Amino acid sequence: MTLQNDIISLLPDRENYIVGFADMGDLIRDHYPYRYAVVIGKKLDDAIIDDIEEGPTPVYYELYQSANNELDAISANICRLLERNNIPCLQIRATVQQTDIPAGFGKTLRMNFSHKMAATRAGLGWIGKTDLLVSEAFGPRIRLTTVLTHYPFEPCGTPITESRCGTCAICVEACPAGAPNGRLWNDATDRDEFFDAGKCRDACRRLSQERLHREIHLCGICVSVCPLGKS
Ligand code: B12
């Protein structure tokens, strides 16, 4: 566990961050020559998330940027630690990198790597009705980054394979895009069976234009209304 402990010690604190170690098996083999993942989640500020009632606010945009920067610095530090130990690894940043965007992304809205998949395999949470990772620790109020590697970490949690949202439909009713259809996720359910990502993207774009005057895709209403993680 020493290397795992060294990785954990790179987190700024244990109150606002979660870390998981996942065995991805064959799940990412088509795109990455790695089997293991370290996934980090940073808790987002409650006051800022609570304030997202009608859509993204300027402070939410600032939080989005600062959380991405902090997470990217942490995953870069984890890579440096692994590389010092001669362990090959790959940083998957919190934000989309232009160079990583696969062909057809504009239509599919699917990257080659899903932070949320690494998180469910690490036992950190499940996928909610609006396709968010709902973490045990902070609900959906987190952003994620991941490091992929060959190093056979000992999994710290048991993979979570189905939703624990039950009959709650608060995010379904609050979604301004009408993107979710209310169906519960399990690990054999494709996103498109319960969530229309195109509708979500269009609403995120519109709300960001109207409220932030920026060409980005922020919303956050589903993150804000989830009763899990609300203090
Ligand atoms: C493309 C993208 C979008 C697109 C499409 C969203 C979508 N749901 O697919 C658009 C622009 C619409 C979008 C919007 C937003 N996004 Co976005 N987005 C991404 C991105 C870059 C890729 C997601 C992707 O490839 N999706 C494809 C589908 C198929 O995969 P998926 O979404 O991960 O979900 C499936 C898998 O996880 C799978 N799965 C999970 N576990 C397992 C286990 C097994 C064994 C199997 C087989 C499958 C499986 O189940 C899910 C359903 O099929 C990720 C970052 C990343 N690289 O992961 C961020 C990410 C998903 N976005 C995020 C956020 C916060 C948002 C927004 C709230 C914007 C904002 N900040 O205000 C909105 C709302 C999103 C929502 N409700 O889903 C966060 C989510 C954090 C969380 N708590 O879940 C991420 C992880 C970014 C981050 N670094 O934290 N986003």
Image (tube, rainbow, N blue to C red):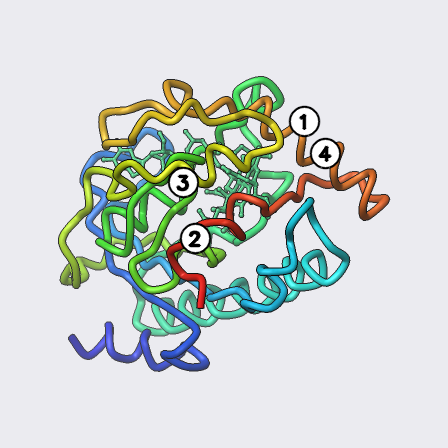
Task: Name the side, left or right, on which 98 lies relative to 186.
Answer: right
Give the secondary structure at mark 3.
loop
| Badge 2 residue CB within 8 Å of ligand 1 | yes
Q: CA distance from mark 2 to mark 3?
A: 15 Å
Task: Name the side, left or right, on which 163 lies relative to 80.
Answer: left
As drawn, the label of residue 98 is none
Disc with the residue nearer the chain's start (2 vs 3): 3
Which amino acid type is shown beneath numbered disc 3?
Answer: Ser
Q: Splitting the image into 4 quarters, where does residue 85 fall?
A: bottom left
52 up-or-down from 105: above or below = below
> How many numbered badges does the structure rendering display?
4
Residue at 17 percent of width and 58 percent of height? 152
Which residue carries the number 4 mark? 205
Disc with the residue nearer the chain's start (3 vs 4): 3
Which residue carries the number 2 mark? 140
Residues under numbered marks 2 and 1 in contact, where contact means CB atoms less than 8 Å apart: no
- Closest to the camera, between mark 2 and mark 3, is 2
Give the secondary structure at mark 2.
loop
Q: Splitting the image into 4 quarters, where does residue 210 fall?
A: top right
| Badge 3 residue CB within 8 Å of ligand 1 | yes
Which residue carries the number 3 mark? 114
85 up-or-down from 20: above or below = below
Percent from the top left, x then y, of residue 77?
A: 46, 72
Residue at 53 percent of width and 64 percent of height? 44
Which amino acid type is shown beneath numbered disc 1?
Answer: Asp
Label 1: few (<14), some (14–19) or many (≥20) C-alpha neighbours in 10 Å: few
Which amino acid type is shown beneath numbered disc 4?
Answer: Arg
| Badge 4 residue CB within 8 Å of ligand 1 | no
- Residue 182 vs residue 209, the one in the foreground: 182
Which amino acid type is shown beneath numbered disc 2?
Answer: Pro
Percent from the top left, x then y, of residue 79?
A: 42, 65
